[in-house]
Amino acid sequence: MAQYREASPAYPTEVIDEFATLTFIRDAGENNDSVIDCPASELPADFPANLKN
């Protein structure tokens, strides 16, 4: 790995200062496509409060 690092630039070459809050809600199982099945613009107005049990 050191050999590759010294031979060429390490990527990413630009640092972007952006942060996001990630919230783990529950275990939905492996390979469950319904976990993320719509773009953020189509989420319910009360998301993520609508996920609370």
Image: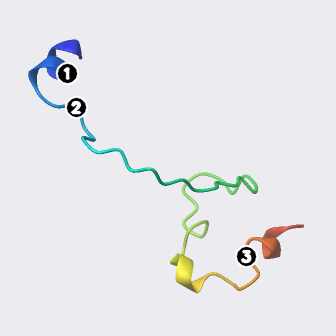
Q: Are marks 1 and 2 in contact (CB under 8 Å)?
A: yes
User: Which label's residue is closer to the chain start, 3 or 2?
Assistant: 2
User: Which label's residue is closer to the chain start, 3 or 1?
Assistant: 1
Q: Nearer the viewer, residue 8 or 29?
A: 8
Tag in front: 3 or 1: 1
Give me the disc on residue 47: 3
Q: Is residue 51 left or right of residue 29?
A: right
Mark 3–mark 2 Cα distance, whole angstroms, equals 38 Å
What residue is shown with label 2?
10
Q: Is residue 11 left or right of residue 28?
A: left
User: Which label's residue is closer to the chain start, 1 or 2?
Assistant: 1
- Identity of the residue furthest to the right in this view: 53
Quarter location, residue 44: bottom right
Q: Nearer the viewer, residue 33 or 23?
A: 23
Mark 1–mark 2 Cα distance, whole angstroms, equals 6 Å
Mark 3–mark 1 Cα distance, whole angstroms, equals 42 Å
Identify which residue is drawn at 75% across, 57% down. 25
Give me the disc on residue 5: 1
Name the amino acid, label 2. Answer: Ala
Label 2, residues with CA under 10 Å away: few <14, some 14-19, many ≥20: few
Identify which residue is drawn at 71% across, 52% down. 24
Give me the disc on residue 31: none
Q: Position of residue 12 (x, y in %)?
A: 28, 41
Q: Position of residue 21 (x, y in %)?
A: 64, 55
